[in-house]
Image (cartoon, grey):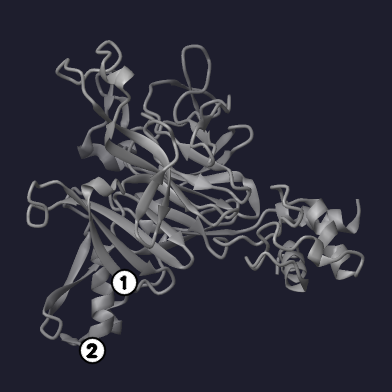
Amino acid sequence: MTLLAALFGLCATAQTLTFKGVYQNNRYDDHADHSYSEYVGWNSTLGKAIFIVENGIYRMDWDGETLDTPYKEPAVNKADFYSDGQFTDNDKALWANNFNLMFGNSGAIMANGVITTVFSRTDDQTAEDGSNRFVVRKWNAETGDLLSSQEFAESACLQSSGMCVNPIDGKVYGLFYLTAQDLPEEIVNDPDFFVDQDGISADTDAGYCLCTIDLETMTITPITPGLYYSNFVTFAINAEGRAFAMTSGGTAGVEGEDGKLYNIDGELTGAQLCEFDLATGMKLETGLPATGYNSQVSRQSACFSKSDPTKMYWNGYYNSGKGYNEYGQWGSLPDSEWKTNGKYDTSLYEVDINTGETRRLTNITNRFTFACMWVVEDDEQVYSDVNADGTWDIADINILVNIMLGRDNADNYNGRAYVTEGDQVVDIADVNAVINFMLGK
């Protein structure tokens, strides 16, 4: 093995991954031993009641064997702004209270140091017809500061199963749920093909569509020449620009010795990994088996580490919310027993995108789910696809080293591909960045 190959191999070695995410509160509240907020007091200067809530940005570390209990980062400490019955820092109090607004029930994304949350609500005061409104808020991903808030009409179709930056072209893609979409005449005029619930032919439909989105204007641009009806619950793009979504899985099955579920034919069942072509918006036929895990329809999240584009990390549910009840029948598990039956338990999964092999790495303490999730210090591209062949491999490293040694000219590769600094210029900074990355610095 050459020195370069050995250095390249360091990229695939095990390492601690630090995940962060926007907390998505959808656990069952029994109003008994779980408090979702703490009332601090009325702030007369701000003219509002101040609360400390669970919502916020959370961190959890995975070392390959154990997963830390998720904790808030940045932390919210009452003592920083309130003492002896008095508010000591109004700005800090308002900052803490703003986490009340960090909801991403219709999607969220962290891009370029800014978190964008999309919250869907029905508000008769802002919409005369009582239709849904999308409230889009921007947040500083490091400090948690609320940067802006803006409302959009339901027609903006901002509900998504997830959004993600494609590191290859810098665009933001997502699977958006489009409503009231016009259907082709050949479908509208064929009642045997499409009818509504009353048996009357309809001329609109709803479903998921792969789109790009401008996070400045929140304008989506559909790519898919049609709609998908699967219950997609995640969306993520890896360092190679390959896009994946996870479907929910709610079918019954028999648990095998490996802890996965199998159908009557002995095949894996449950949630399914899907791949999409970002250029055409079409779902690709992967031929991969199901994951063997039954997750729920509720919003979930997934992400990749740039150091290993073959592994997708998925924050999903432990089960579909269903199981065999006390009568031996398959059905929804009771809410009253959620603490013991695992109905709202969540897990961290690892999905191999090439084989479909899925592992439940561990359950997540306190059943955390995230509206979006990312790997800390891994949200920007850290390698250089110097020869622009779509893959970062030993060929790129050879080129960089030859440039460093004066055996090749960087001008031969400038402007051809995304490189470390994002400037499309190959220089010594790129060489140093890649070498340091391989050495774990």
Identity, as a three-letter code, of the amino acid under mark 1 = Leu
Image location (x, y in percent) of residue 307: 65, 55
- Quarter of the image with the C terminus in it: bottom right
Q: Name the residue: 33% across, 72% down.
A: 147
Mark 2 or mark 1: name the one nearer the start of the chain.
2
Residue 386 can be seen in this image: yes
Image location (x, y in percent) of residue 256: 52, 23
Q: How many angstroms separate mark 2 from mark 1 (CA)?
A: 20 Å
Q: Secondary structure at mark 1?
A: strand
Q: Which residue is mark 1?
A: 146
Q: Which residue is mark 2?
A: 88
Callout 2: few (<14), some (14-19), or many (20+) C-alpha neighbours within 10 Å?
Answer: some
- Where on the picture, by quarter, is residue 146? bottom left
Q: Nearer the viewer, residue 215 or 324?
A: 215
Q: Name the residue: 85% across, 69% down.
A: 404
Q: Residue furthest front?
A: 185
Q: Name the residue: 24% across, 13% down.
A: 191
